[in-house]
Image: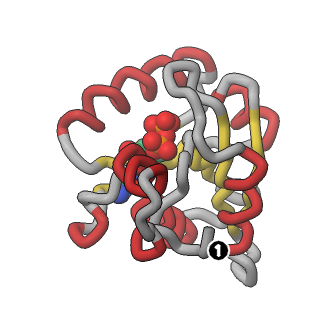
Amino acid sequence: MMSRIALFPGSFDPFTKGHADVVHRGSKIFDQVIVSVGHNAQKKRFFPVEVMVEKISEAFAGQDNVKVVAYEELTAELAKKLKAKFLLRGLRNTTDFEYENTIAQVNRHIFDDLETVFLITSPKYAYINSTIVREIYRFGQNVDEFLPYNL
Ligand code: ADP
């Protein structure tokens, strides 16, 4: 039987407990979840991709159906390369929806076998947002409570 692989792509700058919740829940639905850390053309990074790959791997050590990779190509191309038929994304609010709706259409246009599956955020993580965590960190405050690993 073909295994059902989901790709969870994102900037993850940084990867938060909200993202980790999507991975945990996704790993119960799919045989394998591959978290891919990439550059978003609209966003200049603060945490290097390599550092995030290491930290996310640390957070999921011991969960062998979760893998973490860095990527630079188009998300749909990466999915095809990894034989992932599903893209996993999280939805917190209508702003996420507007954005996610557009990219899901585009990704399916590029690779028509690719279905995007959305998980609605768990309420306790709904307010966690990478931009805000990054800002707090830049100003020297502790952000451990928002992250599933130690920086
Ligand atoms: P991108 O730059 O590709 O949007 P992000 O790292 O900002 O990447 O987010 C990756 C995915 O995780 C997006 O689908 C986003 O909606 C989702 N996400 C972000 N924060 C949360 C959260 N607290 N709970 C659930 N999903 C989230």
Name the quadrant containing residue 60: bottom right
* Rendered image coloring scheme: secondary structure
Give the residue drawn at x 30%, y 66%.
Answer: 125
Name the quadrant containing residue 81: top right
Give the residue drawn at x 29%, y 37%.
Answer: 96
Up/down of 46 relative to 25, above or below? above
- In the current view of this chain or complex, which residue is farthest to the bottom? 62
- Where residue 95 appears, x then y in whole percent? 23, 34
- Where residue 40 appears, x then y in whole percent? 57, 27
Quadrant of the frame with the C terminus: bottom right
Secondary structure under the numbered disc 1 in the rendered image: helix
- Where residue 9 appears, x then y in whole percent? 59, 42
Amino acid type shown at disc 1: Ala
Up/down of 110 relative to 118, above or below? above
Give the residue drawn at x 74%, y 25%.
Answer: 73
- In the current view of this chain or complex, which residue is farthest to the front? 140
